[in-house]
Amino acid sequence: MAEATTNLRTHAAKRLAPEDARNAAREVRARRLRAFLFVAPLLVFVMFAFVAPIASMLFRSAYNPTVANLVPASLVAIADWDGEGRPSDDVLGQFAIDLKRLANDRTSGQLAEEINRFLPGTSSVVKSTARTLRRVDDGTLAQTGPALLLDANDAWAEPGIWRALQEAGKVYTTSYYLTALDLEMTRDGSIQQRDTQIYLKLYGKTLWMALIITVLTLILGYPLAFHMAQSSTSRANFLMVFVLLPFWTSLLVRTTSWIALLQTNGVVNSTLIALGLTQDPFELLYTQFSTIIAMTHILLPFMVLPLYSVMRGIDPSYMRAAMSMGSRPIPAFLKIYLPMSLPGLSAGALLVFIISVGYYITPALVGGTDGQMISNIIAFHMQQSNNWELAAALGSLLLFLIIALYWLYDRFIGAGNIKLG
Amino acid sequence: MKYRSILLASALAFGAHGVAAQDLTVTSFGGAYGAAQQKHMIDPYVAQSGANILFEDYGGGVAEMKAQSESGNIQWDVVDIEVIDLERACSEGYVAVIDHSMLPPGDDGTPASEDFIPEALHECGVGNIVWSIIFAHANDAYPGGGPKTIADFFNTDAFPGKRGLRKRPQVNMEWALLADGVAPEDVYEVLATEEGQSRAFAKLDTIKDDIVWYDSWSQAPVLLNDGGAQMVQSANGRIFAAIKDENAPFTMVWDSHVYDLDVWAVMEGTEKKDAALDFIKFATQTVPLSGMQDVAYGPTRKSAQALLPEEVKQDLPTAHLDEGLKADGIFWADFGESLGEKFNEWLLQ
Amino acid sequence: MRGFPEYFTIWHIAGHYALRGIAYLVLAFLIVPILVIIPLSLNAEPFFTFTKGMLALDPDAYSLRWYQAILTDQKWTLAIWNSFVIGIAAAILATVLGTIAAVGLASPWMPFKRVITALLLSPMIVPLIIIAAGMFFFYTTFGLVGTYPGLIIAHAALGVPFVIITVTATLTGFDQTLFSAGLSLGASPVKAFWDIVIPLIRPGVISGGLFAFVTSFDEVVLVLFLAGPEQRTIPRQMFSGLREQINPTILAVATLLVILSVALLVTLEFLRRRSERLRGSM
């Protein structure tokens, strides 16, 4: 369309009187506007329903005002502290006042949780101290507070917990991204690896599993698509039903099937035992193996469909010609057919890979502890540990990864060329 | 025309859902326990009050309450909480403070304040059952005699096989220390120290490869039944019900059981607080409470205790208190968060 | 048997049959796991596996009790109702907005076409867990979490890409001048759209709507994050069933869903042929 516009403009400039040119330009603008107006309602809808939520997740990964809202006065008091030793009694007194207020509002748990993220193990210190402060008289707390804190737990005499409070008090922070990459900021501002390495390993495992699944769907999907492409149209359409039925069947149904098949006394194990192939049932379900096999089954149609649609368009006479001239089948296939089927192959492989990287449901249901992928840990932090900021940071990293893959897909295959059924 | 009448028929069949908004969402643990609550608490209450109740299941823990509270989308009204989690839910403001003076006296006329056992009247909840976390094993897995003690549970040489444990630090950490030789009265003191926590994880490490983790109590008997595990940690009532109702070949082990109460609590911020309290008032009367004997859970009212037949009392946790450890809700209120995090890191290692 | 070219050796022919054998095995891998749940759902026992009686074809080992359980369990009937209500509403929303937009996108005059198309299709590619987390944060501020409108909007956003793709596909053969002709003959844009464009792209619109419906009907991650207990859908109910209490009711529901997907498949095939005929006659 851009070409059409420029053509019209250059034509107009060369051949037309100024007034006609203006009219033509106006006409172009009107048409462009009309086309855009058709799209506008959906665009507004998608902006609200989809884009804004994604943006709010990105924002959330770096923005956490909880502590700043809970104990503003303490944060002001501690701002001047040099980070060495323990802060002055004024700071401790102010914090005791704040903590007692939170304990009575029953919000001290939130503070404990936020501080705990910066110094693991501290939430019990904050919570137990808050518990003891609940029964203390308000009036004298500014004076007695420091002693009460130090009495409640030794940790209040150490600088660590106060530094954690300062860190947690920052409204904008990159710390969740650092955690998501298994890194942490040291006191002098340099970045180092955390003691426990979790997330990078999990990203690695997710990519590795996605790769295995992609390769498996390719190994299974290629011969099937090839066979279908060689068959007559009516036969191919008939076989297509067997590809499309799983494609149209609910994901939950297919996952349920694999649970029925793979569980300890399930269909596969019973069959193996009945055939005398094994005495004891294999442990198949709730493993990485079950995740990979179930996802391969679920994603196979996404490989077969683009492969088939490309292979169907390959003229069989090329292969025939090569073979009739004495080429052996395998070299002929590698030199002629394979390159021609590459567009379908790369489309299917990228699609399967992208979808598997972000998969959640199947690993959650059949994966056990070994088969968990990065999506599962995001869900875990959303629903179980309630560390929404870390979930957002992990999600943002996953999103960047997917966008990079999507960009590749769009560049080499074109997003608009996705075919359905 | 024909498909219109089908549409109409299905619209009528399901139409009830569209019109009647749910009056009250009550959340509990499902399975055999949920069935007993349905029979003795929910159904009679619905019959009496005409209220519409949506009876939901959850896996326990405070996470779901916390998510509702922090996002401001309160979706539950009444929730059944283990006391091990209640203290935390209460001190963090996820459940509401309850005025116990609203509770009716027992059927024998004893005022509620004296009728309930003392632990049952918590600031944020009204006691529902006394129950226990035990372990059980499948009989056919150990023909030569099954595990008898918590040390046996951790002894994979003498008792090979998968162990089903609920995926959370609570109780698992206690058991690890008990199996490692810590005296029951010292367990929580030891667990409050770094060394004690490392010691518990080290003990759990010895069986880590043999553990099957599950998320919800109702999975425990299922795991034993379908061979997914040879021993499971379970709420005592689930195994009791499987043995009693389905003749399941399981054996319960009471050694080092961790006993606890469950309470009914009201979600803080629910718009249906009055209806929620009304339900709790009803459900914690003498007769509904005594119905929990169906799944071998002890009632929290003395007047309900009196209604139980003698032979049932032998299966209740109260008959085994000397072998057990009382779950410490305050410890878990303080340490639930940090141990939860360590536990998950340990799981992923 | 079909004839093989004369240059084929015995090895060529063996290879041909080997390939065919592999293809059939892959087809079996695709279809058997789905079919296996159908007899399992008729199990009279509360197990997820074939009992001895079932293998001996003893009629007493089979029963419809799990189907009955669906209809008598309030949670399942509520879930079925919710799935249809949310699915239909989301499909209508996505189809109306998506169809109109597809017409604009098919216009040669559409500005920023590539970027906007990529944006509108992106809900298909972004992992659901990310969408769910983002929607949970954002919808909360509007009080949409735990409500029907919230889920409908969320599912409609997921359905939009499918409507765009199917309608755009039917529009590729569409002559844009027809619409302009309608306008120049004095029809209002709405009337021109309704009378000229819609009849020509109807098959694409309907199959796009079906895709959007199925997307919502099958979706569970957003439901896990955005639905309250009152908005539970069939997949959500299956998810918690599989996590907490495995019993053959889930297999019965699964079987019904397989039957539904066969019906959908047939409908879509019918529409595709009709669309080909329509375009062929233009």
Image (cartoon, coloured by chain):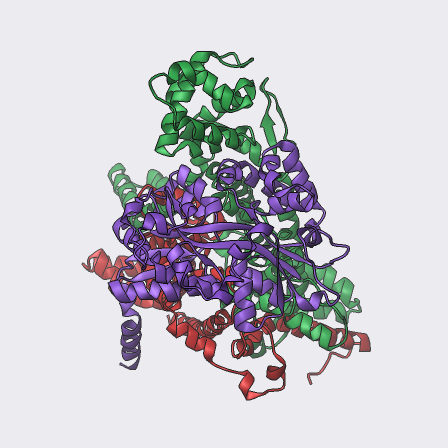
The answer to which of B85 and A301 lies nearer the viewer is: B85
Location of residue B348 (image quadrant): top right
Residue sitting nearer the eye, A313 or B85: B85
**Total marks drawn?**
0
Q: Colour of chain C?
A: red
Residue B37, image x and y in percent?
Answer: 40, 62
Closest to the observer: C15 or A24?
A: C15
Residue C268 position, x and y percent, is 43, 71
Asked whether the viewer can see residue B44, the reply is yes
Q: From the viewer's perspective, is A32 left or right of B261?
A: left
Whether residue A40 sits left or right of residue A59 in the image: it is left
Q: Which chain can be seen in green? A: A
Left of A107 or right of it: where is A30?
A: left
| Residue C195 versus residue A137 in the image, above or below | below
Q: Quadrant of residue A262?
A: bottom right
* Chain B as rendered: colour: purple
Q: Is residue B76 visible?
A: no
Residue drawn at x 55%, y 60% is B219
Furthest-left residue in view?
A: C186
In the displayed structure, B84 sits above or below B278; it is: above
Residue C263: x and y, percent?
Answer: 44, 75
Q: Quadrant of residue A339?
A: bottom right
Q: Where is residue C229 drawn, in percent x and y?
A: 37, 56
